[in-house]
Image: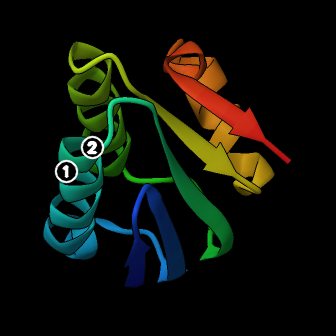
Amino acid sequence: MTTAVSPGHLVLTGVLNFEERRAFIAATQAAIDILDATVTVNCSAVEVAGPIDDAVIGMLVALARAAQKRGARIALVRAPRGLREQFEAAGFARRFDWRG
């Protein structure tokens, strides 16, 4: 996965998986540290082949918690339907703003 960063916005491209978590965490944390509002993560180019790994879900939830502690939110834009369904089933969907 590649992550393009501009102030408050991240654009993800490729496969969202456990191996790519460090780069994603670093980019998202940097955006959270800069803003006290919503960090937008554009997921329109994320490839989801099957269920999302539990570690990836945990990573996203941890980032959402970090954002909330700073008074910010994580907005997942154009996230794949399967990703949102997994978050809803796990009870974590409310931690995110879902757009598009």
Q: Residue at x 59, y 22 (%)?
A: 93
Q: Quadrant of residue 28?
A: bottom left
Q: Quadrant of the N terminus?
A: bottom left
Task: Tell me: 55 left or right of 91.
Answer: left
Q: Secondary structure at mark 2?
A: helix
- The answer for how far apart the CA atoms under marks 1 and 2 are is 5 Å
Q: Residue at x 70, y 52 (%)?
A: 77
Q: Tell me if residue 35 comes above or below residue 65 in the rendering.
A: below
Crowding near the residue tagged with mark 2, few <14, some 14–19, many ≥20 C-alpha atoms within 10 Å: many
Q: Tell me if residue 31 comes above or below residue 7 in the rendering.
A: above
What's the residue type where badge 2 is placed?
A: Ile
Q: Quadrant of residue 19?
A: bottom left
**In the image, residue 43 lies at what x, y percent?**
63, 64
Which numbered dot is residue 42?
none
Which numbered dot is residue 32?
2
Q: Are marks 1 and 2 in contact (CB under 8 Å)?
A: yes
**In the image, residue 59 lies at what x, y percent?**
26, 43
Q: Tell me if residue 49 comes above or below residue 83 in the rendering.
A: below
Q: Residue furthest right?
A: 100
What's the residue type where badge 1 is placed?
A: Gln
Q: Residue at x 53, y 73 (%)?
A: 11
Q: Secondary structure at mark 1?
A: helix
Crowding near the residue tagged with mark 1, few <14, some 14–19, many ≥20 C-alpha atoms within 10 Å: some
Q: Tell me if residue 62 comes above or below residue 19 in the rendering.
A: above
Q: Residue at x 49, y 53 (%)?
A: 52
Q: Which residue is mark 1?
A: 29
Tell which of 57 and 30 is nearer to you: 30
**In the image, residue 69 lies at what x, y percent?**
21, 15
**In the image, residue 76 lies at what x, y percent?**
61, 46
Task: Tell me: 28 left or right of 47.
Answer: left
